[in-house]
Image (spheres, coloured by chain):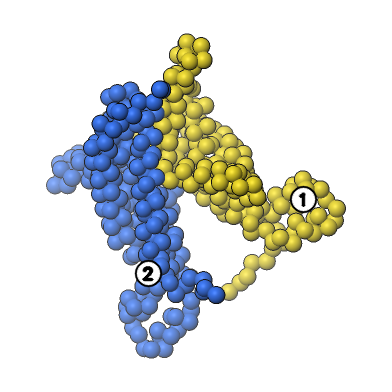
Amino acid sequence: MIFDYTVIWDSLPLYLGGVLVTIKLLAIALFFGLLVAVPLALMRTSRSPWINGPAWLYTYVIRGTPMLVQLFLVYYGLAQFEAVRESVLWPYLSNATFCACLAFAINTSAYSAEILAGSLKATPHGEIEAAKAMGMSRAKLYRRILLPSALRRALPQYSNEVIMMLHTTSLASIVTLIDITGAARTVSSQYYLPFEAFITAGLFYLCLTFVLVRLFKLAERRWLAYLAPRRS
Amino acid sequence: MLNGYGSSILDGAWLTLFLALTSMAVAIVLGLIGAACRLSPVRWLSVLGEAYSTVIRGIPDLVLILLIFYGGQDLVNRVMPMLGYDEYIDINPFVAGVFTMGFIFGAYLSETFRGAFMAIPKGQAEAGAAYGMSGLQVFLRILVPQMIRFAIPGFTNNWLVLTKATALISVVGLQDMMFKAKSAADATREPFTFYLAVAGLYLLITSVSLLALRYLEKRYSVGTKAAEL
């Protein structure tokens, strides 16, 4: 037999630990990413170039450069400056997990902001006019009409972004974290079985991807039921 | 420029660009084959096409790169002795990179192409057949030019993602601009400077691509009306 799976079976705890790290990285990045994305998306829908411009520049630069470069800029790059090394933030910025989460959150915030801005711009004018006719203030209009509706309609595209982000977390293994890919790299170099090690990692990611797709299907059924094609 | 590492990074930039372009050529061929399989009425072909696009798109690029580069090399060297070939085979990182990226993005492009072919109204191919065109003529003269029009927005996206993903090939030792920047950063202890320079170069590549593809989109949309609100 040319494949040796006993080693993989023995390393299963390492992989399962990796799954937890991957999920943790993904959850933290998505949470903070979305938190930043909402105000950015609102800025992107503004007609004033002073508000729209900075948000546009941010998303353009982040979306135009590779994630690996962004990660290296945060993890290795910032250490170049003495001011950073002597600041109170240094214990965090020298920590690989913190840097990975920060870089991933920055990255996903840019993509999510663009998705959300597109969804906000596609709000049917009738909804806005109706809200104005009801005498809602601007803040209330955003809180009650625009954001809930836009967030729902962004779900299908946002599910793609979440899956892309799951795949992006594999870069954490390059900055020494033991996520699924990191576990595979450890197994691969310890036993010199790269093929089996990475195939196993691939299977774990495939399972996680399917779970996420399924969850978003459920979420769409819950929140987007009113847009689903009518059953005849 | 850049402590004398400027020219080395520029060399790397050309390699990045060359890698992206050749990978895209491979990806286009695989994407067309994949789309043809998925649209084929033959059942096992469409299942095969779907399995290709689902599995590849469900696994991170980095894992696939490590799998094909290290795993593939390992597998080749395990299988070849059984076939009576005893020398150790070393796969060239550039060739491996081109095929890996081509293989990955072929799956993404097959989705783009499939959607574009499906967006062409059925009557177009029927009209071509009514004029007495052969199947191949209908495909080349009627379907492909219109498919390109529908595929450009998706293609632009795939190209940008591919260009950025080439940075990952530096992890397996291809001396692209990311690799060169890392060497320079390690040697000078000025990582921020070099990674920022490389970020700027990637931004330049993506910006120029965006402009070029937008121009192409305009050219291929000649004669179509856009609804104005």
Q: Report the residue at 37% width, 33% height from top.
A: A198
Expressed as whole percent of the image width and height from the top left, the position of residue B129 reads 81, 55
Q: Amino acid at mark 1?
A: Val
Element under disc 2: helix
Asked whether the residues under marks 2 and 1 belong to the same chain, the reply is no
- Picture mark count: 2
Expressed as whole percent of the image width and height from the top left, the position of residue A108 reads 36, 53
In terms of depth relative to the viewer, which is nearer, B71 or A178? Answer: B71
* Residue A18 visible within the image: yes
In terms of depth relative to the viewer, which is nearer, A72 or B143? Answer: B143
Q: Residues within 10 Å of mark 2 (few under 14, many from 20)?
A: few
In the displayed structure, A43 sits above or below A16; it is below
Which chain does yellow denote in the image? B
Residue to which mark 2 is pinned: A222
Q: Report the residue at 29% width, 61% height from top.
A: A35
Q: Quadrant of the C terminus of chain B?
A: bottom right
- Seen as rendered, the residue at the extreme bottom is A134
Residue to which mark 1 is pinned: B138
- Seen as rendered, the residue at the extreme right is B132
Chain name for mark 2: A
Q: Is residue B152 left or right of residue B122?
A: left
Expressed as whole percent of the image width and height from the top left, the position of residue A154 reads 42, 65
In terms of depth relative to the viewer, which is nearer, B102 or B58? Answer: B58
Res. A148 image quadrant: bottom left
Q: Amino acid at mark 2?
A: Arg
Q: Residues within 10 Å of mark 1 (few under 14, many from 20)?
A: some
Q: Quadrant of the N terminus of chain B?
A: top left
In the displayed structure, B120 sits above or below B159; it is below
Q: Report the residue at 43% width, 80% height from top.
A: A128
The circle drawn on residue A128 is: none
Chain A on-screen colour: blue
Disc 2 versus disc 1: distance between alpha carbons? 44 Å
